[in-house]
Image (tube, rainbow, N blue to C red):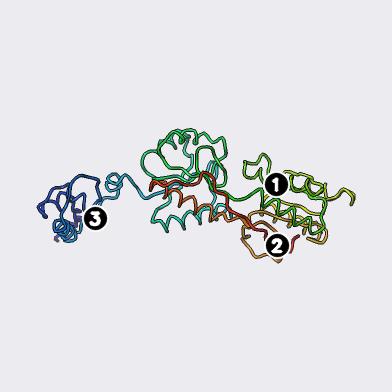
Amino acid sequence: METRKHQAQKSATLDDVAARAGVTRMAVSVVLNGSRSGTRVSKATRQRILDVAQELNYRPNSVARSLALRATHIFGFYSGFNYFDARNPFMAEMTAGLLEACARHKRDLLLHSVFRGQGINGLYDELLSGKVDGLVVWVPDDDPLMALLRASHLPVVSVVESLPAFPSVGVDEYGGAVQIAQYLFEKGHRSILYRMLGAPPRSRGRRLEGIQDAVAQRGMQLQLTTYRPQDFSQEALALSRPPDSRPTAIACWNDLAAYQMLSFCRRSGIAVPQEIAITGFDSIEPPVELDQHLTTVRAPWAEVASTAITYLVELLEGKEVPMETTLPVELVCGDTA
C-alpha cells in the first residue's frame, strides 16, 4: 500500500520574492517590511514586488520586521507590589484601561513580574531586550527596578504613584478624602474613625493626609485603625465606647475595606447608616449586587491606565507629555452614610 508523506509547504522568503521580481533583497525589505534604508523604490517596482509577494503568499517575519522598524508594537505593564491578580477589582479596572488604550493605538500588552528567581536584574535585561516599546509601571517609591530604568532609553510612565524622573498619571486622592470629610460633616458627624492601610504607599498616604487636614479644619475628631481584612477588633472596641467618645462614621481607605466593614456591622446587628455611617474610596463595583449602595469616591482608574498608554505613544512619537497628571475624582452619594 502506498504511503503518502505530507510535507509542510515552505514559506516564501525575501530572497524568493526578490528573485521572482528581479530586484534586490533590500528593495523587497523596504517595501514589505518597512526597513529603514537609503534604497529608493519606484512606484512601478513597488507594485511589482507587492504582486509577486501576493503570488508567492509571502508573510513577513514579525521578529525580523520588528528589528527592522526598531519597534514591536507591544507595551509592557509591571506591578512592583508582588502580585497581579486579575480577579482583584482594582487590577481589573487598570487592566481594562490598559487593554482598551492598547487596542485603540493598535498595540499589544505584555504583563511582567519577577518570577522563577529571575530577580530585578533579570527583569531589567528582559525589558531592555527589545520585547517592548514602552512600559507602564505601578510600583512603590523605592522599587529597585526604577533606578535601573532611569538610565535606560525605554519610555516609562507610572500609574497611581508619582515617581521622580518619570511621567505619572494618578487621581486626586487628597481631594477625594476631603470630599468625604466634608460630606460627613454636612451630615452632622463630628467624630470619624478612619480605617487606614498600614504603611501605605504615597498615594494612599495622601488619602490619610486629606482626611486628617479636613477633619482638623472643621473641628472634628478623628480616630485611626489599621485595616486588617477579617479582623475588626479595633473597630469593635471603638464602637463599644461611651456615646460621647464613640465615632458616628467610619471612613475606609478603599471600597473593599468598606464592604467588609458593612458586612461586620450586619453580623453584629449594627444598623448602617442609622447607628454608624460607612464610606469607601475608588467606586469599584462589588462582584455581587448588594441591597445598599456605598457612599464613596469615584476614581477613574481605567482612564488613568488608558492615559498612561497614550503618553507612551506620544513619547515614542517624540512629543512631550506632562510629568504629573492628576485626574479629578467625584463623590458618589449612596445609602451607607
| Left or right: 220, with 311 as reference point | right
Residue at 18% across / 58% down in the picture? 50
Q: What kind of element bears circle 1?
A: helix
Mark with earlier residue (3, 2): 3
Q: Which residue position is annotated with label 2?
A: 333
Mark linked to residue 3: none
Whether residue 4 appears in this view of the structure is: no
Query: Residue flagged by tag 3: what amino acid is it?
Result: Arg
Query: Residue flagged by tag 1: what amino acid is it?
Result: Gly
Give coordinates of residue 86: x percent, y percent: 53, 53
Mark with earlier residue (1, 3): 3
Mark linked to residue 59: 3
Disc number lying in front (1 or 3): 1
* Alpha carbon distance from label 1 to label 3: 57 Å
Disc number lying in front (3 or 2): 2
* Alpha carbon distance from label 1 to label 2: 19 Å
**Nearer to me, 71 or 320:** 320
Whether residue 98 appears in this view of the structure is: yes
Query: Residue flagged by tag 2: what amino acid is it?
Result: Cys
Q: What kind of element bears circle 3?
A: loop
Quarter of the image with the N terminus in it: bottom left
How crowded is the residue under tag 2: few (<14 C-alpha within 10 Å), some, or many (20+)? Answer: some
Q: Which residue position is annotated with label 1?
A: 210
Q: Which quadrant would residue 260 be assigned to in this image?
A: bottom right
